[in-house]
Each structure stands twice: as structure tokens, then as C-alpha cells.
Image (spheres, rainbow, N blue to C red):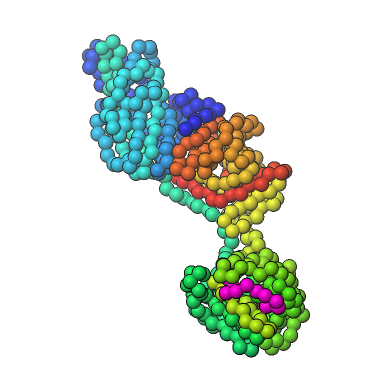
Amino acid sequence: MTARRALPLLALPLSAAALVLALLAFSNATYWSVNATLPPVLKTGNASLYPLARSWYVLGPINATYYYIKFMPGWPESYVVGALAARESGWSARLVEVSASGNPGGPFAIFLGGQVEISNTQTAGPYVPVTAPLTWSMTATSRYSVLARALINKGGIYAWQWVNFTAEPMQRLYQQTFYCPAYTFSFTTQPSWLTFYTSGDSEAYIGTTPSKLGSIQALVLNGKNGYAAAFINISKWIGPVPASWNFTTWWALKSSLTGTDYAQLNFFIDTTGDGRPDLEVVYYISVNGRNPMLLAKTIYGYSLPNVSILYSSQSPPSLTWIKWSVAPVWSTGRIVGIALVIYSPNGETTGYFANVSFTPTTCPLPNGWYGLGTVQVYPGYLQLSGNAVAYMRLIQGALTYVANFTGSGTYAVFTQSLTPIFGVSISGSMFSAICGGSTAQLGSYPSAAYAELRPLNGFGDIIIRDSYGNILARYGCYFAATPYYVGFQTQTGQQLRVYNITAWG
């Protein structure tokens, strides 16, 4: 595990608003009478981490200071939440657990000046010279609290204060994956919009494939001295789809195609927008045949202009599932129907079709997302190329944004004018931190799975994690601009694929 940052969290300035000037319990009566209202050791809070972490105090006969932090459930966390600050030299302090509640569900440790004071296996630690930073680390899953005494000592003069540590898991507020709607039908039944057509001695039916093909339910087309066709009325199934969409089917042959045998995909395309087909486009596979069967008149009752496209003159191997894809089907119009066809004019050929699928070539951005330049949604990812940016508004209450992406480009928190405030750039497995106009090399992390951005109180925390959440690299910097968007950016020659982004708070 590697931790690197522009300014270590150990060196973060401590907020004056969090200084505790309250009563102490002293065991030395003389010192008590002189210093009861001006404690020699102050408990401070790290205001830069707000609202991820915060601290406050309650005045009473004995003052109590509260440290509160929210954590990513199941992932390692570590922050300097404050310090014990001495007003004069010579003081030391330690922490002693008094009580605990809840179950963190994993290890935690509270450090003072680098020494473990309290953990899931330890209830007290050694005296440490103060001033000393108060670091809180954990890999927790559930809310837990620890009530402790801060014991203060200088030359036999002792005092103590209450300290409460409470941690709560963040909740997932937003999650976005990128997908295209896919429409798939598996041939296990024969709905009303699936019709069979045959000629000669051919057969078409829903049956079981040979054992070598898995003995599954599939469409069986046996072309014998004619054709066997299965027509899907797309208009009745899912409604007309753009001809620019992609079509896929998984199919197999009982025996390889020979001579003038054909395997065909006959698409019926409406080019005028009236819902009726105006064009028949046939993609076919045949070794020697160049006149595939046209079916518009058989299915629709009238002939159509047609285009026949030789997909391959090589037969697929027998009894092997093959993916047959056409992308896009046609440049214009909408697909209203398709026929799957096995055609053997002077012999016999059997084909099996497991399913059919239509997917868009590209899809619109999700709701709430905006894009400039070449930004496209594909099944499973968002892609940016060249000078492009894709972004969304920050989520109210979110403390951290976790994203998974590959390629080359930038993941950042932006101003309203889309100026990067802080973030991380990637090129393959190389990562660099971005803080305003400056960059810092983080190194190469082939096992990196997530980049995490935390826009806190004027402080940007950048974390690179592996698939288990372990911290591979970390960097932090201060900013004065107002965070407004989170998103991704590429420059000339760059291409970035984004698989998901999640906001927690």
C-alpha cells in the first residue's frame, strides 16, 4: 500500500473553531485552582475534512469532545481527525477506553502521534508527547462508538478529559452504469408474432438441439427441396426499430452448407414511415449460391425492391454455435420484420437458432448527464474520444464519488464553467493527480480498479484503490473554487471508457 499526497493530512491546519477551552479534572489541587478554565492541552478538530469528519465539544463539569467520521463500508479509511495540542512544553497524553458500543465489523485503530492508543484489540496506549496528531483508521462495516479518557501528565500533575469517537457507514446515494436497451428473444415458445413459412418438404418448429449443442430448446429450420423460414413481426414484438441498430443471433448447422444451400437473414424495412415495409434486405451465407430466397410476397402479399448481400461464402462448421451479427442492418428506415431462413433448393440442410437480439448502435446519455464533443454510450460503458467532456451535477449530501474506467483521460471535480478543480488522470496503468493547474505523478498501478474523489471543505482527496478497496495511492490538495460537477474529460488523441460511477454520503 502506498500513500502519497501534496500536503500530508498530518499537516492539515486545525480549525480554531474546534479548540476546546473547557474544564478539566485535575488530581493536583494547586494546579486546578490556577488552570481550571485554561487547560494546558487542547483537543482540536480538522475542519478541512468537514462534512466527512467533524468535531465538537460539550461544556460541563468535565468537558467532552466528540469526533465523528463517515466511512466507506468495507474499505480501508484513514484520516487525521484532529490533534491534542499543548499550550506549553512538557505535557504528554494517552487515551484509555472507558466503554464501547456497536460492532465495527472489522479492524479499527486510533493513533496519537503515531502510537496505537485504542483499537478493536487494545483499550489503552502509551503516553505520547503533545502536540500530537490524532489519526483514526478503520476497515469497518457498521456504526460503532468508543468513549475514552484523554489522560494528561506533566511531572506528576495529571488531568483528564472525555473523548468520544463515533463512526458511521456512508450510504449509497447514486449509482450509474451505462447500457443500451437490448431486446432479446429466445426460441422456447411460439408467440403470436412468430410465424413459420415453408415450401417443398421443409419444416420449421420449436424443438431440441442435438446433445453436442447442449440439448436446449431452439428454433429448428429444416430446408428440404425448398425453404424453412421463421418470421418475427418486429412491429408487434417491440415496435419498429431503427435500421441502424445491431442485430445478433446465435445459430448452428447440423451439417455444413454445400453447393447452393443458403442460411439467410431477411430484413423488411420501412423507409417512408408508414409502418409498411418498402425494402427487403437479405444477408446470406452460401458457398456457391447467389440467388437467396425473397419472402416479401409470401409474408406481406406483395413484392418489394430488394438488396442481397453475401455475408460469407464459407460455411460455418457443423454442430457449433456461431454468433451472426449484422451492424448496422441498414443506413435508413426502421425494421418492421425479419425472417430467419434455411433454404436448400435441391437438397436438405438443417439449422438451429437459439435467440435473436436487437441493440442500438449508440444510446443517449443517462438522465442528468451532459456531454460535449465525442461522447457516446455503448452497451456497458460510456466512451469519450478527442476533445470531449461528460459530466453531471454533484449529488446533494455526497461525500465521495467512486468511478471505474480505463484508457486515457481525466476524472475530475469541475467548476460550473467545466474547469477541473482536482482529480486524477490516467494513461493505461499510470496515474497522476491533478490539483488546479498542476499535476503530480502517482505511479503505475496495474491492479487499480477504482478512483475516488472527495470534495470536502476546501480540500480535495484523491484515492486510488484496488478491487478490494485497498488504497494504492493517495493525494490531497486545497482548493478555493466552488465544486459543481463531477465527470470525465479527454484531450486530442485520448480515449476513455467509463464503466460506472457511484456517489456515497
The front one of 406 and 79 is 406
Q: Tell me the chief SS of the magenta region.
A: loop
| Residues drawn in magenta | 250-261
Residue at 39% in and 22% down: 113
Q: Is residue 164 visible?
A: no
> Which quarter of the image is occupied by the C terminus?
top left
Based on the picture, tell me whether residue 113 belongs to the magenta stretch: no
Q: Position of residue 16 (x, y in %)?
A: 44, 25
Residue at 64% in and 78% down: 341
Residue at 27% in and 19% down: 159
Based on the picture, tell me whether residue 260 belongs to the magenta stretch: yes
Residue at 74% in and 79% down: 291
Q: Position of residue 367 (x, y in %)?
A: 58, 57
In this picture, residue 126 sits left or right of residue 285: left
- Considering only vertical position in the picture, is 429 above or below 149? below
Q: Position of residue 317 (x, y in %)?
A: 61, 68
Q: Is residue 328 visible?
A: yes
The front one of 229 and 484 is 229
Image mark count: 0
In this picture, residue 101 sits left or right of residue 446: left
For residue 102, which quarter of the picture?
top left
